[in-house]
Image (cartoon, helix red, strand yellow):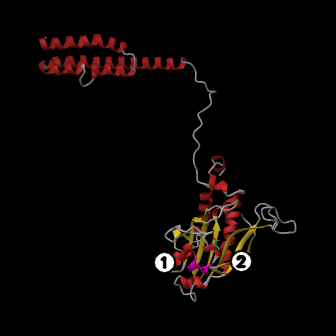
Amino acid sequence: MSDAHATIIASLEQLAGAFQASFDAAPNEQLLRDENAKVLGKKGALTAILKEMGKVSADARKSIGERVNALKSEVERAFDDRLAGIRRREREAELSAPAFDLTLPARTPAPRGHAHPISIVRDEIVGIFESMGFSVFDGPQIDTPANNFDKLGFPPDHPATDMHDTFYTTAGHVLRTHTSNIQVRAMTTQKPPFAFIAPGACYRVDSDLTHSPMFHQIEAFVVAEHVTLAHLKGVLAEFAERFYGTGTPVRLRPSYFPFTEPSAEVDIACVFCKQSDGARAGCAVCKHSGWIEILGSGMIDPLVFEQCGLDPERWSGFALGMGIERQAMLRYGIPEIRLLFDNDPRFLAQF
Ligand code: DAH
């Protein structure tokens, strides 16, 4: 046996005699793996020994190879045994540790936010009109008095234009008092036929149980050829049916708006007492009439078409406008508009 051969065999036997002790001493899986790598790893002792193989004869290499393979299997088996032992001990420690107290109260997750009732109602109403073919037309909350009043047929001395009712900016603009300004903006920029719906914030100098200086409206209007009151009635019936429930009675009551002719206020049977049909009709909310007003509407006045540059001989249309807060209050039985703006989480959590 050559010296080199003898040295390799001696190193292998030394390794064979030593690894078990280092495995046994490893207290956990990570340190066991470290010890294993010191023997079998790329920079381990066995690899170092094999680098000496070039110095021995082919015969010697064969017998060393056999010894190396046997040693590898020994190491691997020892590693697996020791690993199983470590895991078993850890599991036993876990099981004998003090038990979890399953009766402890759980941590309650922080309450999740959700859409505000005004947004919920707005989205639902917009969705109903979109399904009937309307598209959303957006516009500014600060507009000219012309778009908010004049082109809609308000005479210059109309009480609505008074400082008591309308917020004016120092530059002479108005915070729009209704979403009807969008009718003007659509008619002066779009080519009919069209059907638009315009939701958004409006402002009036007004504040009581049912009015807030900032509130929301939805305007819907159609401009096309040969539009009649029957189209308006159909859309109103569909809206009442979908938003207030199947079979909700609807009635049109003659009224006046500067921008529609004829005009109608639209009532539905009182959602509270549901007694629109007889002498017993009524509760305090509907003032014992059995009916509740939900919106204003009418056929677009030819004068408005003219003011917006559309030929009134050719074009016809209807318009309607409703307060979103009002629909929310009726729908959910909310008695005071302020509840919708206080944003008390105990109130909002109910929607
Ligand atoms: N702009 C009216 C208001 O704020 C509501 C309204 C009435 C809108 C009749 C309309 C309409 O489009 O046809 O009181």
For badge 2, the amino acid type reads: Ser
Looking at the image, which residue is at 29% across and 19% down? 72
Residue at image coords 54%, 75%: 145
Residue 3 screen position, x and y as percent = 12, 11
**Beta carbon of the mark 2 residue lies under 8 A of ligand 1:** no
Magenta stretch: includes residue 154 = yes
In the rendered structure, which segment of residues is drawn in magenta? 149-157
Q: Residue at x 35, y 20 (%)?
A: 31
Q: Secondary structure at mark 1?
A: helix
- Pick the front one: 240 or 292: 292
Q: Toward the viewer: 135 or 141?
A: 141
Image quadrant of residue 299?
bottom right
Task: Give the residue type that dot 1 points to.
Answer: Thr
Please tell me whether residue 141 is drawn above or below residue 312 in the rendered image: above
Relative to 96, is 163 above or below? below
Q: Quadrant of residue 57?
A: top left
Identify the secondary structure beneath mark 2: strand
Please give the label number shown on residue 255.
Answer: 2
Residue 188 position, x and y percent, is 50, 79
